[in-house]
Amino acid sequence: MADQWDQFWRQGFITTFGGAMESNYIGELRQLWESLFATMKPGSQVLDLATGNGALACIAVETFRDKGIDARVVAADKAVIPAQISAPRPILALRECVSFHSNMPCEQLAFADASFDLVTSQYGIEYSDWQYSLPEVYRVLKPGMSAHFVCHTTDSSLLENSRREIGIYKSALQQYQIFDAAMEFCKNFSHSAPKQAADRSQELNRVINGFREVHGGDELGSILIADISNHLRQLKTAPAQKITDELGARKSEYNSALRRLMDMESAALAETDFDIIKDLAYNAGFSSFEEQQIFQQGKKLGTHLHLTR
């Protein structure tokens, strides 16, 4: 799983929603975390798990700054966290105040026992193996302190969108293979006999039109078609091999996006999972376990778990 997430975070996104939330989380979801961070005492130590590029850690730093709370924020992720990202300047300034730790899965936290006053995770810890991550969270929490997680669920609006995008990516990359057809067209662009060139062009048009007929009215489908079209236009002025290589790179990026979405679908929690997680939490030593559904603008975004050591 790490490779596609390494690639995603290198692109500079601050949240898992990509460019849709380039300045971090908003609305009720953000308010949930701000209200929680505002209750922390001076000198507190906060650990954010599966942090990505530090979206939640940045909200913590910003809340502490605005409330005049002197607290330390530590953030860890199984993936490689880039030292520098292309993000809005305020985000970059907040990241400078976070102590990041790469290559650190939730199941193996390299921190001393009873180190933190709060452990958090936003759309992250559900990707871990709860059997091993919950005991680790319990271990690094101070006695009487809490962990708060917001997790993907199988009935959330986010997963509905992801399932739709998974279908489009699979159609483009596996069924119609539109990037393979475009790359094959480029490879033969200047070397084929006239009839061969016409055949390649006809085949490319066939797969593109077939995909467009099914998915052209969807924003993601239109983006994929436009991406290929923009590259092919450059054949008039750029070497065919260069365009072929660029299309191959784009295909790889879209395959990576597909794998991330499939990760999300696999990690999302069903209603029956919460009873299992609750039992694991109590077995790990937690004294309480609470769950609450999270909504924003009437749409379910996931479930908030609150565990107390």
Image (tube, helix red, strand yellow):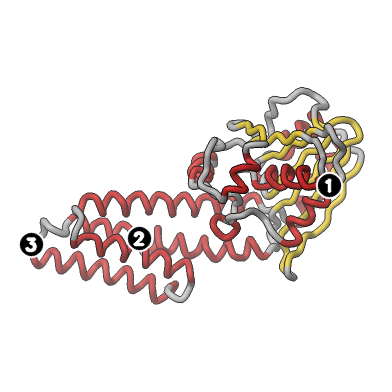
Name the residue tied to disc 1: 38
**Which-is-in-front pick, marks 2 and 1?**
1
Q: CA distance from mark 3 to mark 1?
A: 70 Å
Q: Amino acid at mark 2?
A: Gln
State left or right for residue 217 relative to residue 272: left
- Circle 3 packing at 10 Å, graded few (<14), some (14-19), many (20+), is few
- Circle 2 packing at 10 Å, graded few (<14), some (14-19), many (20+), is some
Circle 1 — which element? loop
Residue in the image at 65% along x and 41% along y: 50
Task: Pick whichever, 300 or 71, lies toward us.
Answer: 71
The mark nearer the N terminus, 2 or 3, is: 2
**Which-is-in-front pick, marks 3 and 1?**
1
Circle 2 — which element? loop
The mark nearer the N terminus, 2 or 1, is: 1
| Residue 214 drawn at (x, y percent) | 43, 74
Task: Name the image quarter holding residue 95.
Answer: top right
Task: Pick whichever, 46 or 89, lies toward us.
Answer: 89
Name the residue tied to disc 3: 193
Q: Is residue 52 visible?
A: no
The mark nearer the N terminus, 3 or 1, is: 1
The residue lying furthest to the top in this view is 112
Q: Amino acid at mark 3?
A: Ala
| Residue 62 drawn at (x, y percent) | 72, 46
| Residue 128 drawn at (x, y percent) | 67, 40
Q: Amino acid at mark 1?
A: Ala
Name the residue tied to disc 2: 177
Quarter of the picture containing the N terminus is top right
Q: Is residue 194 above or below residue 250?
A: below
Mark 2 and mark 3 in contact? Answer it, CB < 8 Å: no
Circle 3 — which element? loop
